[in-house]
Amino acid sequence: MTTSLPSLLLIGGGRMGGAMLAGWREQGCSAAVVVDPAPGAASLAGDGVTVVASVADIPAGFVPEAVVLAVKPQMAAEVLPSYARFAGHAVFISIMAGKTIHAIGAMLGVKAAIVRAMPNTPAAVRQGITVAVSGAHVSDRQKELAQALLTATGACAWVAAEDLLDPVTAISGGGPAYVFLLTELLEQAGLDQGLPPALARQMARQTVIGSAALLAASEEDAADLRIAVTSPKGTTERALAVLRADDGWPKIFREAIQAATDRSRELSA
Ligand SMILES: NC(=O)c1ccc[n+]([C@@H]2O[C@H](COP(=O)([O-])OP(=O)(O)OC[C@H]3O[C@@H](n4cnc5c(N)ncnc54)[C@H](OP(=O)(O)O)[C@@H]3O)[C@@H](O)[C@H]2O)c1
């Protein structure tokens, strides 16, 4: 049985909050209030979504079942305490990088039901992945509501140990940026080889889009799909020898993910 989307209060309708809201809207979210003072946030209104500039403007009588915390982590101490009044009945879902359940509980009240989740921006097209961990005071029903919200924007997985959210943040939270960088680098390499700019851009974009679609449509692993493109002694094999050299992508990716994981740990401290 699928759980319908809960009534929802979204705190922060920026890049990530806005992306998730787009997914919820597509799934027929019928009652949502967004709090965001940014002038651009007003464009999120419509189809059952009300946008207000501050906590004081939340319509009286609106009782959300879920409160999604999508402000920047550095805003948390200033913003969260004014939402403690919802802690009696709502489940809080925080997507703030590096803010632990313990730290959020200290701002909302130690009994608050808190799910900590790490989504990514493909949530906007319902192709995201969110990895979540639930706090001690989250009921089974609240976990179901959180699951319904998080799967409305793509895949959702749960981990039992909160510290796993640090590598999750590094890999899937930031992952879209690495894929977009790859797209930029492919385009630049095309320009360096003398391809016309419009064609270099089209080739880079469509190669990433098409490869992702092929991966999605295939039952094979990424490694099998890579091998299928790589003829012995061919051109791709030459390029892969450079990329997979000892000081190439395997090392660079390990270091990059370690750096992001370390940064996530620093933010949690
Ligand atoms: N972007 C990602 O890929 C990603 C992935 C996973 C998790 N996250 C997490 O998502 C959270 C939001 O990141 P983001 O990239 O979406 O940042 P963002 O675009 O800056 O969005 C934050 C929004 O909150 C607004 N805001 C500021 N003060 C507020 C207040 N008092 N009440 C309500 N809203 C307020 C901001 O308005 P102003 O612009 O006017 O300040 C902005 O529109 C962060 O905690 C981040 O760690 C992001």
Image (cartoon, rainbow, N blue to C red):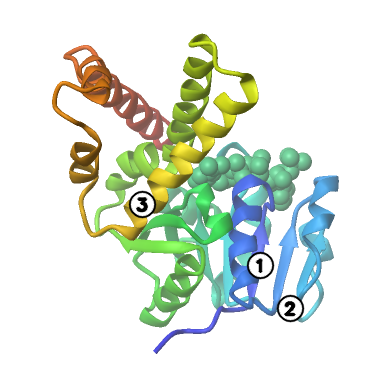
In this orientation, does residue 77 appear? Answer: no
The numbered mark, 3 or 1, whose residue comes first in the sequence reads: 1
Image quadrant of ligand 1 equals top right
The numbered mark, 3 or 2, whose residue comes first in the sequence reads: 2
Image location of residue 191, percent across then percent down: 55, 14
Residue 134 image-quadrant placement: bottom left
Who is closer to the viewer here, 230 or 107?
230
Q: Is residue 88 left or right of residue 256?
A: right
Q: On residue 128, which mark appears?
A: none
Q: Mark 1 = which residue?
A: 9
Residue 158 image-quadrant placement: bottom left
Q: Is residue 246 above or below residue 135?
A: above
Image location of residue 174, percent across then percent down: 44, 37
Which is in the foreground here, disc 3 or disc 1? 3
Q: Are marks 3 and 1 in contact (CB under 8 Å)?
A: no
Q: Mark 2 = which residue?
A: 62
Q: Mark 3 = which residue?
A: 214
Q: Secondary structure at mark 3?
A: helix
Label 3 to label 1, Cα distance in Å? 37 Å
Who is closer to the viewer here, 196 or 49?
196
Q: Is residue 85 above or below residue 202?
A: below
Q: Is residue 212 left or right of residue 234?
A: right
Residue beneath the point at 43% across and 85% down: 2
Residue beneath the point at 61% across and 19% down: 196
The numbered mark, 1 or 2, whose residue comes first in the sequence reads: 1
Who is closer to the viewer here, 52 or 241?
241
Label 1 to label 2, Cα distance in Å? 9 Å
Image location of residue 130, percent across then percent down: 41, 56
